[in-house]
Image (tube, rainbow, N blue to C red):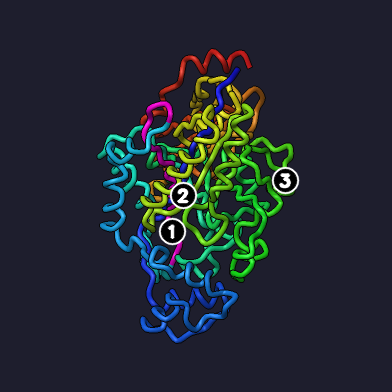
Amino acid sequence: MNEKIIYIVHCVDTEGPLYESLEATFQRIDAAFGLRYAPSFEQLNRLKKGLDIPENLRDIVMEFISDDRLNYNKTWAHVDNMLDEMMSEEWRNSLKDDFGSGYIFNWFILDHIGYDINPRRRALGYHVIYDHYRDKLKEFNQVKDRLYWHYHPLSFFNEAHKTSNNFSYSNNHIQIINRRIIDQMDFPVAYRPGCHVERPDINLFLELWIPLDYGNQGCIESVKDKNQQDISGGRYGDWRRATDQWEVYHPDFYDYQKKGQMKRYIARCLNLNSRLREITKEEIEKAFIRANVYNPTILSVTNHDEREMRPYIKWFMDNIREIQKLYPEVKIMHTNAVDAIRFSLKMKPISAASLHFKWTNNRLDIYSDKEIWGTQPWFCFKTKDKRYIHENLDFHDNNYWSYIFDEDTITLDRIESIGIAANDAYFNTSVYKLFPEKDLERTDSKYLNILSEL
């Protein structure tokens, strides 16, 4: 008989420091509850005491403006003060699982780009947050954590503290992935939606490229959620029709919340220390009940690095251990977002897809030795004038594609480097970088043998 296991996956929406002015706090109070006050510290303190608030909103407003919720990591120094403890072996090992592993983080990295207005003092620029966390992981030799992808669609007025609900308004998501491949040799395999938002265009984009999605927050809309007018009724992160069980599902083509026939996987992930769709003791026990009948179960939570995380992680783990006493046969395992889905689905490991290349003058042929995720590899290039461009390939049979560089597309003499990447059905990632000035004469001999048989 298989073991009874819960896979613990902590997804951090990794957005860097966040500053909030007094005026901005009162603007959020107005947006969430329709309560308008003249901003002042005196008024804020009155509200924290429950004064001047309608009785039916008193508790929720007081929680909204509590010291915990307004205690932001305002600078990188504040973020690092938290990280330097959480990255340590001592801290992680204080929260070991039943297999001897310390705590594991999954850092879903956001790039703040395309903004003209930045009142919350976000860390703007490509790779700014990615580089910071990559360097932190190296500093503490944390090899079990992973870096994945988090994205907020560009707001309509280029404001860094706001978001839209669609990928179609800009190509910022394309630009970010291009740079992840070419600059970082990294291609996303797992995704966390900004503001928990998915819509049809996002659903279809992810289906083409990214197998794993920790976005589902399926649960009954609470009275607390309904009383916050900026998020009620499915605005931002509508998962009301999605499964409320700790299970992984394939979404429907037309409705990402429904189970369907698409290939990609969506896992459930509730909020830790948030004003909506929070993880609760009852939800933790639901995971144990499911695992206790030999259903491999993923128990996943998400929060932000812009707020203090340590006491809430401890609360989460303390409650897991307390509830585990009722289900002593169920073990817990810390893991990354990819392995959790592999393990829960009992997938058999396969090696990563190997891509092979052949140059014929200005034509590049690309062949994969096995099926990849989606219909084609991600294909992009960096020009000598520092533009990053994504392009589609020409299709052939048997995992074989090509591209011609000419006057109708772009000539090779204008290309600095080419990035090619793919995921596969086991969620392996393959990333390649070619330099036309160096690689035009280099052809993979294995590829030539395969190509001659096509």
Which residue is the site of mark 2?
176
Ranked by sequence position, the earlier of labels 1 and 2 is 1
Q: Nearer the viewer, mark 2 or mark 3?
A: 3
Q: Give the quadrant of the C terminus.
A: top right
Residue at the image position 58 percent from the left and 46 percent from the top:
283
The correct choice, above or below, for 169 with respect to 252 in the image is: below
The correct choice, above or below, for 217 with respect to 430 in the image is: below
Q: Secondary structure at mark 3?
A: loop
Estimate the x, y position of residue 415 in percent, counting from the top left. 42, 42
Residue stretch rendered in magenta on the structure: 98-115
Estimate the x, y position of residue 182 in percent, counting from the top left. 41, 40
Q: Nearer the viewer, mark 1 or mark 3?
A: 3
Q: Magenta part mainly helix, strand or loop?
A: loop
Ranked by sequence position, the earlier of labels 1 and 3 is 1
In reply to whether residue 13 is colored magenta, the answer given is: no
Q: Nearer the viewer, residue 147 or 45?
A: 45
Q: Secondary structure at mark 2?
A: helix
The correct choice, above or below, for 7 with respect to 23 in the image is: above
Is 428 on the left or on the right of 257, as rendered? left
